Image: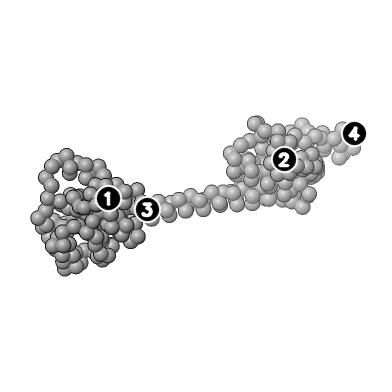
Amino acid sequence: MNIFIVEDDSNIIKILEKIIKDRELGNLLGYAKDGVNGLLEIQSLNPDIVLVDLLMPGKDGISLVKEAKAIHPNTQFIMISQVTSKDMIGKSYQSGIEYFISKPINAIEVESVISKVQDKLNMNRKLNQIQSLFTQEQNNLETRKVSYSVEGVKRVMQRIGIVGEAGSQDIINIVKYLHDTKQNMSSLTVKELCSHFTKQVKTMEQRIRRTATVGMINLANLGIEDYMNEIFTEYSNGLYNFEQIKIEMDYIRGKSKKRGKVNLKKFIDGMVFYSSREN
């Protein structure tokens, strides 16, 4: 721990210096004999612990602690004084000190107080490290969630045969956006959604619709080959309206001239759902 002393009495400085060195309480950075220079040194050195006298020329200890705390909030202050006024001692604690040591200096008390402050500093540092690791892990989780959601979309698109279609990247971008903003299609139109990515809104919407339509056609063909195909049963109602899939199946069989239609809002919401489930 780096320690600094602000004290106008040279004898007190010598005593504190000897206690700190003899008892190996920390690294003494230096000292100042008045509050003004003391504050400047604290600003520059950023010590871990400051031993500061209450009554000093230029700037008293209470003022120094308040100003220094505003600059280096993690620095710990120990007030030293022969003042016994409860009011002054109370003001000292309000300014931000950790302990108050009364003069004349007692080596055992100084060692005990500095050790307690060091323990607190070490604990705070460990807690900060834990918090930092936790925050980092949360950020990593969020990053992984986005990554997984993209991979989830790609897996679904691969199953329904639209990975190479022109609108596949548009779909990935939209699903990622809905994940990131925690939204769904109930509060948006497809046009509003596309407007977040391009000024050519109609062109983007057409790409997505054509891509989704290819997926519907592929599913309809799967259903004709095997009505119990797991990809068909999973996505024919999850991404599309099953009635529209059946209409498309009849068209492919030549039983109808009417083709199935894609509900893009349902398709996109389905992609969001499946991409999360695929993680």
Counting residues from the start of the chain, the first of labels 3 and 1 encountered is: 1
Q: What residue type is labelled 2?
A: Cys
Q: Distance between the residues labelled 3 and 1?
A: 26 Å
Element on which disc 4 rests: loop
- Residue at mark 2: 194
Counting residues from the start of the chain, the first of labels 4 and 2 encountered is: 2
- Residue at mark 3: 128
Asked whether the residues under the numbered discs 4 and 2 touch, taking CB atoms below 8 Å apart as contact, a structural biologist would say: no
- Residue at mark 4: 257
Task: Please name which of the two marks, 2 or 1, marks the residue nearer to the observer.
Answer: 1
- Residue at mark 1: 64
Counting residues from the start of the chain, the first of labels 1 and 4 encountered is: 1
Q: Residue 56 location in percent, x, y?
A: 20, 52
| Left or right relative to 158: residue 126 | left
Q: What residue type is labelled 3?
A: Asn
Q: How far apart are marks 2 and 3 (CA)?
A: 42 Å
Residue at image coords 79%, 39%: 202
Within-10-Å neighbours for mark 4: few <14, some 14–19, many 20+: few
Q: Which amino acid does label 1 sit on?
A: Leu
